[in-house]
Amino acid sequence: MTMRVAIVGTGSMGSLLGHGLQRGGHQVTLIDLPHRIEQIRAMKGLALVDEAGSVSTVEPFMATSDYSAAGAQDVVILATKAQDLPAVAPNLPRLFNTDTIVLTVQNGIPWWYLLGLSGELAGAHIHCLDPDHTLERSVPRSRIVGCVAYPAASLDPDGRVRHVEGRRFPVGELDGTIRDRTRAAADMLEDAGFKSRVIQDIRSEIWLKALGALSLNPISALTRATMVEICSFVPTRDLAAAMMREAQSIAAALGATLRRSIEERLDGAKAVGPHKTSMLQDVEAGRPLEVDALLEVILELADLTRIEAPTIRSIHACTALLNNVIQSRGTRAGDQV
């Protein structure tokens, strides 16, 4: 079945998804800031360089900055950086009909993570990601389907997306049920050439991905090292492992169970090769860093669960300072540090 899919944010992951979904026969509308939309139109679509180096361009159904022009969709994929979500959130209801679902593919822990939890954390809210509840008001919990994006990709200055490796996009309902809409979302991603399955514990899967993001991203930003360099150099590998262990304790306190060990997680990251993390790509481009979604949120959850996280806290301080420097100077990070 052809799905009407709006992708909000056409960075590397949004572009990768948009290219695959349009090519897979779905009706894709791309929504982004005017300069990015103009770039896509100038290229006559989304240009993808695949793992083998082959280039293909796919023209989406629509590319626009106007949410009203896009109209109601079957699926809305939120592919912007977490720090940009509050700005786009008030426009999202323009894309909704009665049954529209929202897939979230941000790095790190999503703003909705605590929604629906029982016990001591019932009614808790992640303030650093949604300080004034804009996201909760704009995107009802009933519409959300969690999605974990495992592929590695980057965006070239000319607007082309490079698919480095990986095709997995598991999806799951927040309440752990398996529903027709979740199966349809997985089928849609399979149509696009990706690997997807419905899992019943999406929060645990989010933590599994987050362990790599919260450690390797800031270490790469601070050192300019690639994933294979970080995981091959014993001191930085040990540093990443220490951060992962602290995060794993927080995850366990929240009821999450990780299906892979920390060593397996590090070996998997090493196997990706000389890939620059998304945070390192942002440093080199002089863009704001995902400090809140990758680190600040972990410290907020550490406080909620009363777990010490000294290593994460130290790396957060350094990364937050780097982010402040980038934003205050407004120049490429290579000229700053």
Image: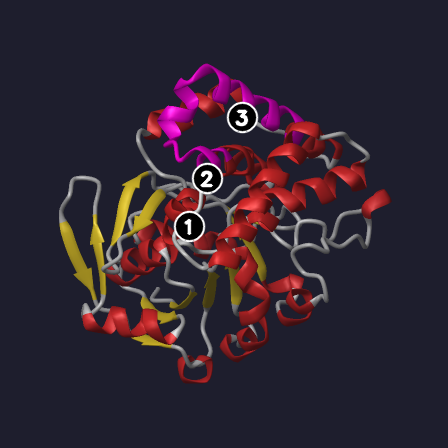
Report x, y in % for residue 154: 32, 48
Q: Is residue 308 left or right of residue 24?
A: right
The residue that label 2 is drawn on is 221
The quarter of the displayed image where residue 69 is located: bottom left
Q: Secondary structure at mark 3?
A: helix
Q: Residues within 10 Å of mark 2 (few under 14, many from 20)?
A: many
**Crowd rating for badge 3 (residues with CA inside 10 Å; few <14, some 14–19, many 20+):** many
Residue at x 26%, y 69% (from the top left corner)? 40
- Answer yes or no: is residue 180 visible: no
Q: Is residue 260 above or below residue 65?
A: above
- First of labels 3, 2 by sequence position: 2
228 in the magenta segment: yes
At which x and y percent is residue 261?
54, 21
Q: Identity of the amino acid at label 3?
A: Ala
Q: SS for tag 2?
A: helix
Pointer 3 with pointer 2, Cβ within 8 A? no
Label 1 sits on residue: 282
Which quadrant does the N terminus fall into?
bottom left
Hey, which residue is sitting farthest top in the picture? Answer: 234
Query: Where is residue 221 drawn, in percent x and y?
Result: 46, 39
Over which residues does the magenta segment extend? 219-247
Do the numbered discs 1 and 3 sit on residues whose CB atoms are within 8 Å?
no
The residue that appears at 59% across and 37% down in the rendered structure is 207
